[in-house]
Image (cartoon, helix red, strand yellow):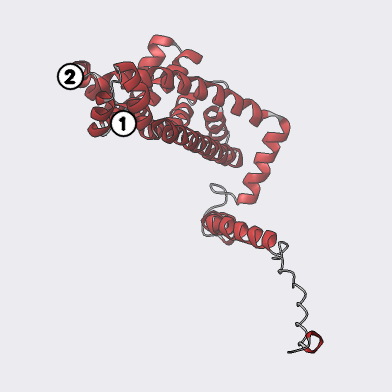
């Protein structure tokens, strides 16, 4: 019989070693470095263009009278901004372009949905669409001026005309490009025409519609600048034209840079809107 006192003592339990907590401090600098690297990678081309623009006139590769260094252009841009002239011109141009774009969206999307959905209407209007889609908006500028005058109405109407076609054509293509299997499946589930259009046709056409809206956003600025060079008293087109006639070359380039910046901002806003509505499309059709 073995005495209990002679039994070997059980080894003491080792103290639990706390799990190593991952250090969170290096994560934030790493993310910042990653974001900075991506931003730098995307900005390399712009930085190279800025360097060439600044250097070429100073070393005599181009005549600095006709292409001043970028620093002089930015100085002129800041002067226009500080005096309030740039804000006035930008406000006038944005009011016209956004008004025209909004009217084009309100008119072209419903019409495109109808044409894309109803084949008899598409067959009726197709010849007319083919005629006008191949007519440049700027070619009709004298017509708009003769009919509507030199005021705001003719400029906004020209923007509406130029913006309507990419929206209309992309909307028609988006509706016609819906998968027929989705339509047949929805009809087999008993959806009426209104619910079918709401649940299947419209959500599936949203990406293509937004492609047309993005194109129209670019057209609304480009066409308006050309229209503002004729009979306008304010706007970026007027600023560029006035600076050219008065040989204020830095002011002219400042207006051009402003147009490019506005176009970039408008495009990014439309991309953000497209992502939002694309998320809605997936949720609805799920």
Q: Is residue 263 left or right of residue 71?
A: left
Residue at horizontal 42%, vertical 36%?
A: 282
Residue 111 at x, y percent in the picture: 33, 18
Residue at horizontal 70%, vertical 29%?
A: 84
Q: Secondary structure at mark 1?
A: helix
Q: Are marks 2 and 1 in contact (CB under 8 Å)?
A: no
Q: Is residue 276 left or right of residue 211?
A: right
Q: Report the disc number at residue 275.
A: none
Q: Where is mark 1, residue-wise?
A: 174
Q: Nearer the viewer, residue 132 or 76?
A: 132
Q: Where the N terminus falls, by quadrant?
A: bottom right
Q: Nearer the viewer, residue 92 or 9?
A: 9
- Where on the picture, by quarter, is residue 278? top left
Q: Earlier in the sequence, mark 2 or mark 1?
A: 2
- Where on the picture, by quarter, is residue 174? top left
Residue 236 at x, y percent in the picture: 55, 30
Give the CA distance from mark 2 to mark 1.
Answer: 17 Å
Q: Where is mark 2, residue-wise?
A: 123
Whether residue 268 can be seen here: yes
Whether residue 230 can be seen here: no
Q: Nearer the viewer, residue 159 or 88?
A: 159
Residue 197 at x, y percent in the picture: 33, 22
Can you tell which of label 2 and label 1 is closer to the viewer? 1
Q: Secondary structure at mark 2?
A: helix
């Amino acid at each position: 019989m073995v005495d209990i006192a002679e039994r070997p003592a059980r080894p003491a339990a080792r103290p639990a070693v706390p799990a190593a907590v991952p250090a969170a401090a290096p994560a934030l600098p790493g993310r910042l470095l990653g974001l900075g690297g991506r931003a730098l990678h995307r900005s390399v081309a712009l930085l190279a263009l800025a360097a060439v623009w600044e250097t070429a006139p100073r070393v005599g590769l181009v005549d600095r009278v006709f292409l001043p260094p970028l620093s002089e252009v930015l100085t002129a841009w800041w002067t226009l901004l500080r005096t309030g002239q740039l804000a006035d011109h930008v406000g006038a141009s944005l009011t016209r372009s956004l008004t025209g774009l909004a009217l084009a969206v309100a008119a072209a999307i419903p019409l495109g949905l109808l044409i894309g959905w109803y084949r008899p209407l598409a067959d009726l209007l197709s010849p007319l669409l083919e005629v006008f889609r191949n007519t440049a908006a700027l070619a009709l500028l004298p017509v708009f001026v003769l009919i509507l005058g030199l005021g705001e109405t003719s400029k906004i109407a020209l923007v509406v005309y130029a913006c309507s076609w990419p929206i209309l054509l992309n909307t028609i293509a988006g509706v016609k490009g819906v998968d027929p299997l989705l339509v047949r499946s929805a009809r087999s589930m008993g959806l009426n025409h209104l619910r079918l259009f709401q649940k299947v046709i419209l959500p599936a056409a949203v990406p293509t519609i937004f492609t047309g809206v993005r194109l129209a956003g670019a057209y609304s600025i480009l066409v308006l600048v050309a229209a503002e060079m004729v009979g306008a008293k304010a706007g970026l087109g007027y600023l560029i034209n006035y600076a050219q006639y008065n040989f204020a070359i830095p002011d002219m380039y400042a207006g051009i840079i402003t147009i490019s910046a506005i176009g970039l901002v408008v495009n990014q806003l439309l991309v953000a809107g497209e992502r939002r509505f694309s998320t809605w499309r997936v949720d609805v059709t799920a």
